Each structure stands twice: as structure tokens, then as C-alpha cells.
């Protein structure tokens, strides 16, 4: 028992050190360079970003551009080919492969790794949706768990993406679906303690996602408050506002 406790403490310390070694200013600067390709919902915008980011990567294959193209491929797979037969099949694997190159490279800046690790795990889950290879889902959540342990104290991304994957799983994956409630609650708590933890776009999605998971009467008033926040944070309908308005209307019937 004492040996297992020691191992647990050592692992926790290692994860804390990993997070503390990151330069937060550099991490926020990288986030700004990636923000325009993350969490996209407009299909026209995604197609335009795909063309631009591929062009940029062809002309300069920097680490940032490789991350951008990996993330755009993820957004293409999620929004243009998820659970349907389209010309964009295979983009989940493209995303995973590009991000894996960065993940396994010793030269990748450590401040870029939270984004690479998180989207890499999510890309693997999209491969599961395309290939129906359910054995990969467990691997995806293993990658998520690693990213959450290392980076969730300093960035919302690993919990946000894991929660997003979990909430869309069929009911019989109940052991993994539980992460949707856990992760969105965790992001909200951290954002309330630190206003710089997550941007308005992410919080709009997160408040809606929390309310979507807690639709019962017990949490009705809190869910409605969170839906109002999701709406307020998304004045241009680029995040969670549309879904928040739809759910708000449903809960008030």
C-alpha cells in the first residue's frame, strides 16, 4: 500500500513539474496563433481555412504551421465527414499523422505540446468513427488522460476535447461518457478562479455543454443561467449560442 502511494505521489509530482516548466506567456502566444483554426463550426469557413492553411504549410513547414494543418484536418474530419460518406474521409488520419510527428519530435516546443497532445487524442477518436475500430477508442482516452494530467491545470484544451468526445459517445460507453460532466464542470470551476484560463468562445461551448448534460429539474435553474452565459459570450453565433438558445427554449417548455 505504501509503495503504491509513493508511486502515485511521484507521478503526480512529475506531472506538476511538466506543467510548471512551461512558459505561460509563450503558451498564450501559441494559442493566439492557433485560435482561428480551433473549434470551428461554420463549414464554409472550415473549407476556406483548409485551403489557406495547406497553402501556408506548403510554403513554410514550421512547427506552428504543422500544428495548424493538423488541427484544421481535425476540424474537417469532425464537421465535414463525421459519420458520413464524403470526399473528406481520411482527414482524421491525416490530422493524427501530422500531430503525431510533432508529438514524437524532440524539437517540438514544449509550449506547443498541450495543443498537439490534446488534438492528437481527439483525432484518434475520429479515426474510430471512420473505421469502426473500437479498440482505438480506449487508446484515445489513454492519450486524453495523459494530456489532462500534464496540462489541464494551465489550459482548458485536454478536458474540453475529452468532454466533447465523451458527450457524443453512445450510451453504452457509459464509463467514458462520464467524462463529459466531469470535464466541463472542471473547466468552469477553473475559469471562475482564473479569468485567463479559457477564452469566450470555449466558455460559450462549455456552458452549453454543461447545461446539455444537466437537463433534469434538479439542475434546471443553474442550467438556464449557464445557457444565458453561453449566449452572452457568443454575440456573433460562432460558438455555443445557437445550441444554447435551442436548449433554453426546450427547458422552458
Image (spheres, rainbow, N blue to C red):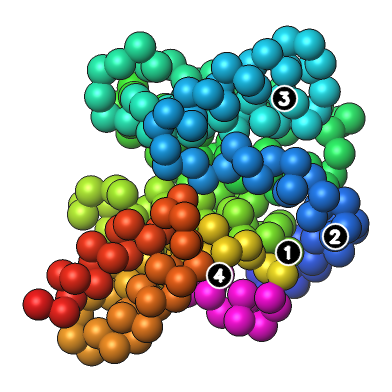
Give the side of residue 177 with respect to residue 50, left or right.
Answer: left
Q: Are marks 3 and 1 in contact (CB under 8 Å)?
A: no
The residue that disc 1 covers is 154
Which of the 4 quarters of the picture holds residue 250?
Answer: bottom left
Sequence-first tag of 3 and 4: 3
* Span highlighted in magenta in the image: 185-195
Q: Nearer the viewer, residue 122 or 79?
A: 79
Q: Can residue 7 be seen in this view?
A: no
**Mark toward the viewer: 3 or 1:** 3
The residue that disc 2 covers is 24
At numbered mark 3, what does the secondary structure look like: helix, strand or loop? helix
Sequence-first tag of 1 and 4: 1
* Structural crowding at the residue carrying mark 3, measured as other residues with C-alpha within 10 Å and reported as few (<14), some (14–19) or many (≥20): many
Give the side of residue 116 with respect to residue 201, left or right.
Answer: right
In the displayed structure, 221 sits above or below 8; it is below
Q: Do the residues labelled 3 and 4 touch (CB within 8 Å)?
A: no
Question: Was residue 188 drawn as part of the magenta stretch in this picture?
Answer: yes
Q: How far apart are marks 3 and 2 (CA)?
A: 21 Å
Sequence-first tag of 3 and 1: 3
Q: How far apart are marks 3 and 1 (CA)?
A: 22 Å
The residue that disc 4 covers is 187
Residue at 63% x, 41% y: name it. 36
* Residue lying farthest to the front in this orientation: 236
Residue at 47% x, 55% y: name it. 236
Coordinates of residue 203 in the picture (x, y in percent): 52, 66
Q: How far apart are marks 3 and 4 (CA)?
A: 27 Å
Q: Do the residues labelled 1 and 4 touch (CB within 8 Å)?
A: no
Amino acid at each position: 500500500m505504501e509503495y503504491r502511494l509513493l508511486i502515485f505521489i511521484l507521478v503526480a509530482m512529475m506531472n506538476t513539474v511538466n506543467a510548471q516548466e512551461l512558459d505561460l506567456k509563450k503558451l498564450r502566444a501559441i494559442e493566439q496563433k492557433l485560435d482561428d483554426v480551433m473549434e470551428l463550426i461554420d463549414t464554409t469557413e472550415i473549407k476556406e481555412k483548409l485551403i489557406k492553411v495547406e497553402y501556408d504549410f506548403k510554403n513554410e513547414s514550421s512547427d506552428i504551421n504543422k500544428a495548424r494543418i493538423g488541427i484544421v484536418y481535425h476540424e474537417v474530419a469532425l464537421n465535414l465527414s463525421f459519420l458520413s460518406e464524403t470526399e473528406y474521409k481520411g482527414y482524421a488520419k491525416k490530422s493524427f499523422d501530422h500531430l503525431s510527428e510533432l508529438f514524437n519530435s524532440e524539437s517540438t516546443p514544449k509550449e506547443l505540446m498541450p495543443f498537439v497532445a490534446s488534438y492528437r487524442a481527439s483525432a484518434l477518436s475520429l479515426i474510430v468513427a471512420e473505421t469502426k475500430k473500437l479498440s482505438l477508442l480506449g487508446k484515445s482516452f489513454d492519450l486524453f488522460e495523459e494530456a489532462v494530467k500534464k496540462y489541464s491545470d494551465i489550459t482548458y484544451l485536454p478536458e474540453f476535447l475529452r468532454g466533447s468526445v465523451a458527450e457524443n459517445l453512445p450510451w453504452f460507453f457509459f464509463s467514458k461518457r462520464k467524462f463529459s460532466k466531469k470535464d466541463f464542470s472542471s473547466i468552469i470551476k477553473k475559469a471562475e478562479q482564473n479569468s485567463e484560463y479559457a477564452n469566450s468562445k470555449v466558455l460559450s461551448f462549455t456552458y452549453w455543454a454543461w447545461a446539455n448534460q444537466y437537463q433534469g429539474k434538479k439542475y434546471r435553474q443553474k442550467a438556464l443561467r449557464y445557457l444565458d452565459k453561453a449566449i452572452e459570450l457568443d454575440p456573433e453565433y460562432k460558438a455555443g449560442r445557437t445550441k444554447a438558445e435551442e436548449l433554453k427554449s426546450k427547458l422552458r417548455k
